[in-house]
Amino acid sequence: MDISVVLVIAFVVISTFLPALITGLDKYRVKRAIYKLPSEKEEVREFQLAYKRILQDRHIPHLLIDANHKQVVVPSDYVKNGEVTLNVSPSAIHGFELICDCFVFMTRRGNNNYQVRVPIEAIKALYAFETGEGIKYARYL
């Protein structure tokens, strides 16, 4: 087969299917934009901003956590109806850090210290105790 014949066939095929392919990709991009869930980095950034805003307003930040999540580590006496609400103000916790997409910190109840481990996907909400304002994650609505 001659190279010019191959080029003509390739041109016909490309010119026939390329517009449909591009249109299909555009529809795919639109669908992804509509249904796109925030990435974990976006969720962490959103969490940090909400946490700072709550503290700046001189409120007490609380986390609402799905206690049934397999990676959640909290004292069992904190759990009620499959949920845990924790005061995460700087005076209530220490050693607050993000390790492998989990928030890890120490908290105290009575005379006992507890290590708490909360994966990002187990956080249902972060809110100000006084007003109830904050962020609620769509996956739990």
Image (spheres, rainbow, N blue to C red):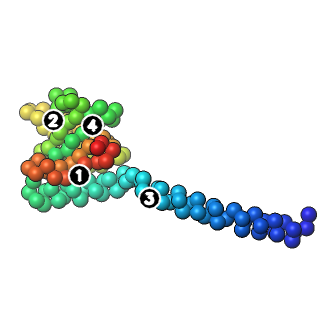
Mark 3–mark 4 CB contact (< 8 Å) = no
Q: Earlier in the sequence, mark 4 or mark 1?
A: 4
Q: Earlier in the sequence, mark 3 or mark 4?
A: 3
Question: How many other residues sit within 10 Å of disc 1, few (<14), some (14-19) or many (≥20)?
Answer: some
Mark 4–mark 1 CB contact (< 8 Å) = no
Residue 121: percent from left, percent from top: 33, 43
Amino acid under label 1? Ile
Tag count:
4
Amino acid under label 3? Ala
Q: Secondary structure at mark 3?
A: helix
Give the residue at mark 2.
113
Q: Which residue is located at x 26 percent, y 43 percent?
A: 124
Which label sits in the foreground, 3 or 2? 3
In the picture, the quarter occupied by the N terminus is bottom right
Q: Earlier in the sequence, mark 1 or mark 2?
A: 2
Give the residue at mark 4.
66
Q: Nearer the viewer, residue 124 or 93?
A: 124
Q: CA distance from mark 3 to mark 1?
A: 21 Å
Q: Is residue 21 above or below residue 140?
A: below
Question: How many other residues sit within 10 Å of disc 3, few (<14), some (14-19) or many (≥20)?
Answer: few
